[in-house]
Image (cartoon, grey):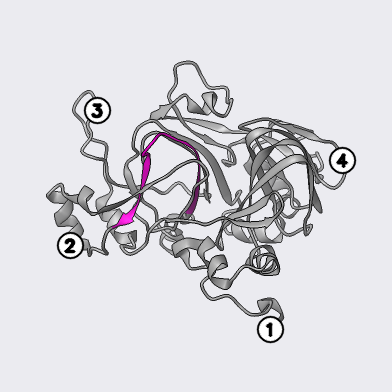
Amino acid sequence: MSERLTSTPLLLEPVLCERPWGNRRLADYLGKTLPPSARIGESWETANEARIASGPLTGQTLRDVVSAFSYQLLGRLGVAASSPFGDFPLLVKFLDADDVLSLQVHPDDAQAAPLGQRGKTEVWHILAATPQANLVVGLTEPLDQETLRQVLAQQQLPAYLVHLTVQPGDTILVPAGTLHAIGSGILLYELQEQSDITYRFYDWDRRDAEGRQRPLHVEEGLAVLKPASRGRRIMPLQLDHGRQVLAACRHFLLERWDIDGSLEVPLRSGETFRIVSCIGGSLQLASETGPWLSLALGQSALLPALASALRLAGHGTVLVASVPDLWHDVIMPLRQVGYSNDLIAQLAGDTEDLAHLPADNPSQT
C-alpha cells in the first residue's frame, strides 16, 4: 500500500447484516441507506471487512489498513489489544431488534483462545426503546450445570431469567460469560471485543415456517457460562461540560460527547485510536490539523492514534470508543473531578476491572 496514513479522521463504510429479527429502524432513526425490503438487524461499523470511505485510503478494508499501518492507526494500546490476531480489536455495531434475540452466552478471552478468537465482553447504549422494552441480563440465582440442564429440559428456564427494563440513554455492560438477550423494540449501539463466538443457549421454543428450530449450543454455553455474572446498568459520570464516561473496563472505554458549537479534546498521540459514532445531529471533526470530515447521523469515523487532538464542530452527539489506559484515561481524570472509588468502579460492572483502584499511577510504583 503506497498511500500514507495521517492523523486525519477516516469515514467508515459499515457492513450491513440481514437478520430475521431486524427491521428498518437503522434507516428510520439513524438515516442509514438499507437495501429495499431487507430486514437489516445490524450495522457493523468497524468490522474487519468495513471499508474506508474518505481520503486516499478509500476502498481499503479496515483489516488492510491495520496490516499496513498498525502502530500509526492503533497506537500502543490498540496494537496490544490487536495481538495476536493482527486485526482491528474493537467492534462497534448499531443493532435493531424488532423481535427478541435468542438467549446467548460468549466465552472470555482465555476460553476463546483455543478457538483462535477473543472472548466477548460488550456494552450497550440504548438509542430507542418501546415502553417496557427489556433485556435479559443474567440468572436469578447461580444455578449449576446439571440444574440448568434440567430446567431447560422442563422448559422452565424463563422463570430463572433477570429482566431489565430500559429506556433511551441507558448503558448496560455485559461481561463475557453472562447469559443475556436483547428484547424486542430496542435500537442500540453496541461496543464489544472484535469476536464472533456466540453460543445460542435458548431460543424461546421458536420454530420457522417449516416447523424447524434453530440449532442450540447448550453444552458449549454451559462450559463458558458464569452463572453469577450479570449485565449491569452503569451510572454515567460527567467528566466535564459536554463529556460523560458511560462505561470502562480493560477492553474498552465508552464516552458520550454532546457538542453545541465546538469542542477540542487533547489526546496522547501514539496511545490509542478513537471510534466516533454520531447518534444525534451532525458534526464536523478533525485532528489537531488538517481537513474537516463531515459526520452525519448514523455514521462512524476512525481517528488514528497519530492524532494529538480531536476537534468537533456543529450541534450533535457522538459516542467515542477506544482501548484505554485505565489509569490515565479513566481513574485519574475522574478522581480529579472528585468522584469516589466506588463510583469509578461501577463503570466496569461485573468485570470488576476497576474494583481495586491503585492510590497512585501503577506504572510508577
Q: Residues within 10 Å of mark 1 (few under 14, many from 20)?
A: few
* Residue that badge 3 annotates: 208
Residue located at (50% from left, 56% from top): 234
Q: Residues within 10 Å of mark 2 (few under 14, many from 20)?
A: few
Q: Is residue 219 left or right of residue 87?
A: left
- Residue 48, compared with residue 147, is above or below; it is above
| Kind of residue at disc 1 | Thr
What SS does tag 4 mark? loop
Residue located at (61% from left, 48% from top): 88
Q: Is residue 141 left or right of residue 35?
A: left
Q: Earlier in the sequence, mark 4 or mark 2?
A: 2
* Residue that badge 4 annotates: 290
| Kind of residue at disc 4 | Gly
Residues at badges 4 and 2 in contact (C-beta under 8 Å)?
Answer: no
Q: Earlier in the sequence, mark 1 or mark 2?
A: 2
Q: CA distance from mark 3 to mark 4?
A: 53 Å
Residue 138 appears in the picture as rendered: yes
- Residue 155, compared with residue 223, is above or below; it is above
Q: Is residue 135 left or right of residue 365?
A: left
Region rendered in magenta: 122-139
Residues at badges 3 and 4 in contact (C-beta under 8 Å)?
Answer: no
Quarter where residue 23 is shown: top left
Residue located at (74% from left, 52% from top): 305
* Residue that badge 2 annotates: 146
* Residue that badge 1 annotates: 365
Nearer the observer: mark 1 or 2; the answer is 1
| Kind of residue at disc 3 | Asp
| Kind of residue at disc 2 | Glu
